[in-house]
Amino acid sequence: YTAVGCAITTISSNLTEMSKGVKLLAALMEDEVGSGQDLMRAARTLTGAVSDLLKAVEPTSGE
């Protein structure tokens, strides 16, 4: 459980920096047909998956 906890902490603490980088890359890629939008869509999908993971491992308030 410790390894999973460390991995989740690392992922969640790096999401803000990742989102800044993705926004910058998407802006730089706008010249290529839709590439920036594809990158943003992939980042949203990844963020949604991480959110689902965090919800799934969240202990219930009764425990």
Image (cartoon, helix red, strand yellow):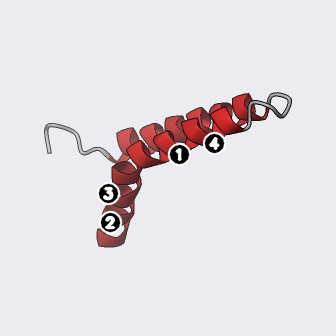
How far apart marks 3 and 2 lie (CA) works out to 5 Å
Left or right, 25 with respect to 52, comes to right
Mark found first going from the N terminus, 3 or 1: 3
Q: Nearer the viewer, mark 3 or mark 4?
A: 4
**Mark carried by residue 51:** none
Left or right, 59 with respect to 34, comes to left
Q: Is disc 4 placed on a helix, strand or loop?
A: helix
Q: Are marks 3 and 2 in contact (CB under 8 Å)?
A: yes
State which quarter of the image contains the N terminus: bottom left
Q: Is disc 2 placed on a helix, strand or loop?
A: helix
Q: Are marks 2 and 1 in contact (CB under 8 Å)?
A: no
Residue shown at 64%/33% (left/top)?
A: 27
- Which amino acid is tagged 2? Cys
Q: Are marks 4 and 1 in contact (CB under 8 Å)?
A: yes
Mark found first going from the N terminus, 2 or 4: 2
How far apart marks 3 and 4 lie (CA) works out to 25 Å
Task: Say which residue label 3 marks.
Answer: 9
- Which amino acid is tagged 1? Gly
Disc 2 packing (10 Å; few <14; some 14–19; many ≥20): few
Task: Say which residue label 2 marks.
Answer: 6
Residue 35, located in which quarter of the rendered image? Answer: top right
Task: Say which residue label 1 marks.
Answer: 21
Left or right, 26 with respect to 18, comes to right
Q: Is disc 3 placed on a helix, strand or loop?
A: helix
**Mark carried by residue 25:** 4
Residue furthest bottom as drawn: 3
